[in-house]
Amino acid sequence: MTSAGSASIHASAVLAGNRAVLIRGPSGSGKSRLAFDLVLAGRAGYLPPTTLIGDDRVRLTVNGGTLTVRGVAELAGKIEIRGLGIRSVNYAADGPIGLVVDLNAADAARLPPPESLKTTLEGLELPRIPVGADFNALPLVLAFLTTT
């Protein structure tokens, strides 16, 4: 995908500081929950300021060797909070992807092999966290974003 008119994908994304976290997974896997938890972690100071880019549908574009995620206009600033419905939050238009989180990943492991900690999207290799079903992804993402 190389243009702003590219097809949307089923995913959520947040901008944490200067890099975006792309959250993928099947319906009901917790994409919106993780996105909102990351926004709250940013508000609490555990992360740099963190803002929603998009929930449920986002677009990917490649520009100058960088993969960027953008929200879709119809859902700008909207996030589903299970038990409350669709809510409005501050949002960022886009951000360069610095991490991909795959929820309900079949290859999640306690000590994952190095090859499972990266993925290729649109020809670009990116860091990846595979998260098993029913496992809390938030501590993994916080650890990735705050440790070396």
Image (tube, rainbow, N blue to C red):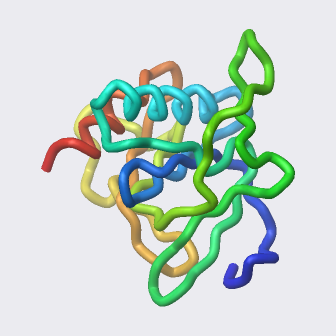
Quadrant of the image occupied by residue 56: top right
Q: Quadrant of the N terminus?
A: bottom right
- Which residue is rendered at x = 65% and y = 34% of the image? 89
- Given the current orientation, which residue lies at the most extreme bottom position? 64
The residue nearer to you, when weighing 105 against 91, is 91
Quadrant of the image occupied by residue 41: top left
Residue 59 left/right relative to 39:
right
Residue 142 left/right relative to 24:
left
- Which residue is rendered at x = 46% and y = 79% of the image? 66
Q: Is residue 34 above or below residue 119?
A: above
Quadrant of the image occupied by residue 50: top left
- Given the current orientation, which residue lies at the most extreme front position? 90
- Which residue is rendered at x = 21% and y = 42% of the image? 146
In percent of width and height, residue 20 lies at 46, 56
- Given the current orientation, which residue lies at the most extreme top position? 83
Residue 37 left/right relative to 145:
right
